[in-house]
Image (spheres, helix red, strand yellow):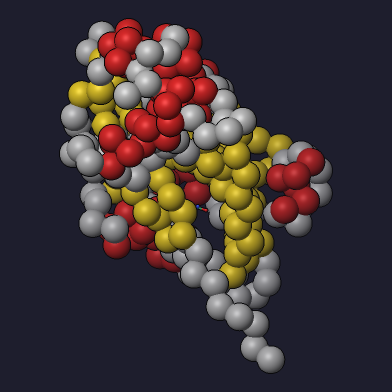
Amino acid sequence: MTIAEVQAPREPKYYTVKRHLLERIATLPAGSVVPTERELASELSTSRTTVRQALVELVAEGRLVRRQGAGTFIADPKITWPLHLTSFTEQAEANGFVASTTLLAAERVRAEGEVAARLDLAEGAGVFRIERLRLADDRPMAVETSHLSAARFPQLTRHIRRQQSLYTVLRETYGVVPVRAEELIATAPASPREATLLGTDPGSPMLVLGRHSRAASGEPVEWVTSWYRGDRVTFIADLSAPRP
Ligand code: GLP
């Protein structure tokens, strides 16, 4: 088969290659090796540049995975991650994973701009900034930066060094439970730092969640930004129609 034979009218050539590869991927188990760029180019009678463009998109979408020096393989299926007002630890466990956390930073800083506004604090007020790498079954899932009021949660950095779940600390130490939240979802390319922490390439697509949660009193609890690997997770929100 050549690409010219199956190319739809006005379809870019690389997209025809991608469609063809997607059909092949669907029939093969995760971990199967994908032929090299050169092999595919010659098999499909097209250029290596065209094949490369198709492979780059399939890697970015999490269908294929590149391993340095070993080649390109069919990726594991993505993890589906329901969006609920639960903690990372609970969510990972509900999905059948063992959650773990690496604490990257826990420091007191001054609230500025969006952090101050989200936490209903004056500019310059003390906040704790907690940065953590969140893992599921030892696979890095997200880099998470949380900001919480230092006046409201005294000694928080001390507690978070001993207990990996922030929500457990909030509940057990401060008697605070987030009961409602706004969750923002956006895409962004990975910075070199996030890419290193999450084991991917700089510039690869990330899903960025911003959670702004409040306690039953209405007071803000946290403002959190979580960077997830876009090739590794699918978020699911359960939507229902508003009551008439
Ligand atoms: C999720 C949310 C965060 C929240 C965290 C708490 O990742 N996006 O806003 O702070 O869960 O998780 P844990 O209690 O495991 O630290």
In terms of depth relative to the viewer, which is nearer, 75 or 200?
75
Q: Residue at x 42, y 61 (%)?
A: 82
Q: Residue at x 61, y 80 (%)?
A: 241
On screen, residue 111 above or below 152: above
Task: Say left or right for 90 vs 15.
Answer: left
On screen, residue 222 above or below 10: below
Label tally: 0
Q: Residue at x 60, y 57 (%)?
A: 183
Q: Residue at x 56, y 42 (%)?
A: 208
Q: Can residue 176 be seen?
A: no
x and y, in percent, of residue 242 in the image: 65, 82
Q: Can residue 183 be seen?
A: yes
Quarter occupied by residue 89 = bottom left
x and y, in percent, of residue 93 in the image: 28, 58
Q: Quadrant of the C terminus?
A: bottom right
On screen, residue 32 above or below 165: above
In terms of depth relative to the viewer, which is nearer, 28 or 203?
28
x and y, in percent, of residue 136 in the image: 29, 44
Quarter occupied by residue 109 = top right
Q: Quadrant of the N terminus?
A: top left
